[in-house]
Amino acid sequence: MLEHGGRLRRAARDYGIALADWLDLSTGINPDAYPVPAIDPQGWQRLPEDDDGLDAAAAAYYGSDRLLALPGSQAAIQALPFLFGPMAVACVSPLYEEHPRAWERAGHKPRRLPSLERALSAMTPVVLLCNPNNPTAERVPRDALLDAASALEKRGGWLVVDEAFGDDQPENTVAALAGGEAAPNLIVLRSLGKFFGLAGARVGFVFAAPGTLDRLRETLGPWALAHPSRIVARQALADTAWQRTARERLAAASQRLAETLAPLGAARRTALFCAVGGGRSPLPVAPLAEHFARRGILVRRFDPHGLLRFGLPGHETEWRRLDAAIDEWQAS
């Protein structure tokens, strides 16, 4: 199993710091999550039904009804590679490592390449990337993604885009075009875990051509998404006022986080996390992560890339804790 953020219980054991005393900046999840409504008891007692309004709410939010709801985008990450015969897959790297791992498990040969341009030039049947990228926070412009899909279509290839962190800039996303006339070979993954802060609900969507969705639906089987999760997701996707306020709030918070982290190096940012280091400016990842951990602050480390990823603090006291820890690092 790969390492992921949010392993607070293990950190509490390792450092002897009580679970309640940790500041978790390791996950990139909105700390001011969508307020979960009370669940009708029937939501726990009845099997979920596909015509409950969730698909309609998702279609309105994402701009396309060519979608399949599933238990987190992770379900699509693991199932999608089995729809293809063994081949080479170009992954724009570094990226969320569950992607190449899943393709490898399905018998494919992932190739990690540093840019979309290099991935396209590799002439593989499938190109895969995260946009915005996790963990580097880099973004590929929407038009560049559509050009890439078009180039791949001409040679019978596919473009897979994970937009888990894309909700802050919907104008730069391509889910609405996936599987349609403009991009029939485009497959897009989305999630309610990040922007909406509903990671525990395990709700995601895949956007693709109808044939691809049908094959995934058969793979996942009936009742893939729990009824209570569907209820919460439907309400969150329809709440445009909350979404608008959340985007404004997250834009200000991510700018503040980038400024807070400036003493450690230039920070690249999405609305939900900042990345420091990597590339030609690697960080001393291990000692810096250890420094934060001993102060009860959990960050996400990417040792092979010399990079640390920081999620957003949720309250003013948490911001002050992060400020103090950075000051102590500079003074040491």
Image (cartoon, helix red, strand yellow):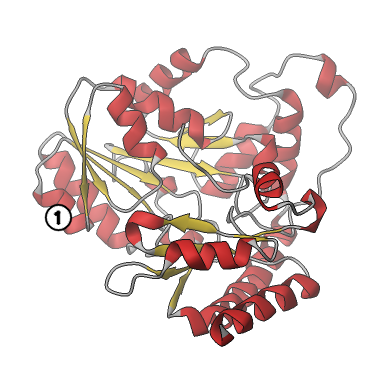
- The kind of residue on which mark 1 rests is Arg
Residue at 68 percent of width and 50 percent of height? 197
Quadrant housing residue 31? bottom right
Does residue 276 lie above or below 263 as drawn?
above
Any part of residue 137 in sight? no
Does residue 191 lie above or below 40 as drawn?
below
Could you tell me residue 18's position as x and y percent? 80, 51
Any part of residue 7 in sight? yes
Residue at 59 percent of width and 40 percent of height? 58
Q: Quadrant of the C terminus?
A: bottom right
Q: Residues within 10 Å of mark 1 (few under 14, many from 20)?
A: some
Q: Nearer the viewer, residue 296 or 38?
A: 296
Residue 220 shown left or right of residue 214 in the figure? right
Residue at 57 percent of width and 79 percent of height? 329
Does residue 275 lie above or below 225 as drawn?
below
Could you tell me residue 25's position as x and y percent? 62, 60
Could you tell me residue 276's position as x and y percent? 44, 71
Residue at 35 percent of width and 22 percent of height? 211
The mark tally for this picture is 1
**Which secondary structure, mark 1?**
helix
Quadrant housing residue 251? bottom right
Q: Which residue is mark 1?
A: 118
